[in-house]
Amino acid sequence: MPRIPIVEDSPTMRSLLVAALDDITPAAKIVEVENGFEALCVLPRGNGDLITTDINMPDLNGLELDSFAKSNESYRSRATRWKRCDIS
């Protein structure tokens, strides 16, 4: 079963993404994450087959999250594909 974390600070956008991904891949386990700092705690608990992150978030934005994950050995060694999107 694919695991797809959605990192998005807007509850409305998270709901929209969950609904869209659920239609596309109903068997996927979708994990909702409210911000970049929470993502740093959630992501090491299991591989994400696709990680969708908002770019424009307060504190730790999606670009910083992406950069941190790619430069940190504990994240980089995981078989993870990152998809950055900003649809707001």
Image (spheres, helix red, strand yellow):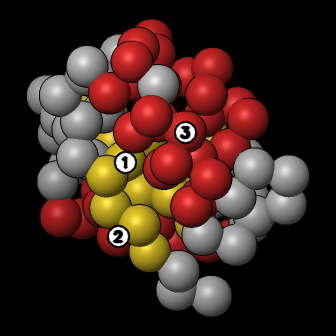
Query: Which mark is nearer the camera, 3 or 1?
Result: 3
> Which quadrant would residue 48 be assigned to in this image?
top left
Q: Residue furthest bottom?
A: 88
Whether label 3 touches label 2, CB < 8 Å? no
Q: Identify which residue, 40 or 46, lies in the foreground.
A: 40
> Dot 3: few (<14), some (14–19), or many (≥20) neighbours within 10 Å?
some
Residue at image point 33% right, 42% down: 4
- In the rendered view of the protein, which quadrant contains the N terminus? top left
Q: Which residue is mark 1?
A: 51
Residue at image point 31% right, 52% down: 82
Q: Which residue is mark 3?
A: 68
Residue 67 place in picture, x, y as percent? 51, 48
**In the drawing, does residue 25 fall left or right of residue 14?**
left
Q: Above or below — where is 44 with respect to 14? A: above
Can residue 73 be seen by looking at this rendering? yes
| Mark 2: secondary structure | helix
Q: Identify which residue, 36 or 18, lies in the foreground.
A: 36
Q: Which residue is mark 2?
A: 20
Q: Above or below — where is 68 with respect to 7? A: above
User: Which amino acid type is shown beneath numbered disc 2?
Assistant: Ala
Q: Identify which residue, 3 or 44, lies in the foreground.
A: 44
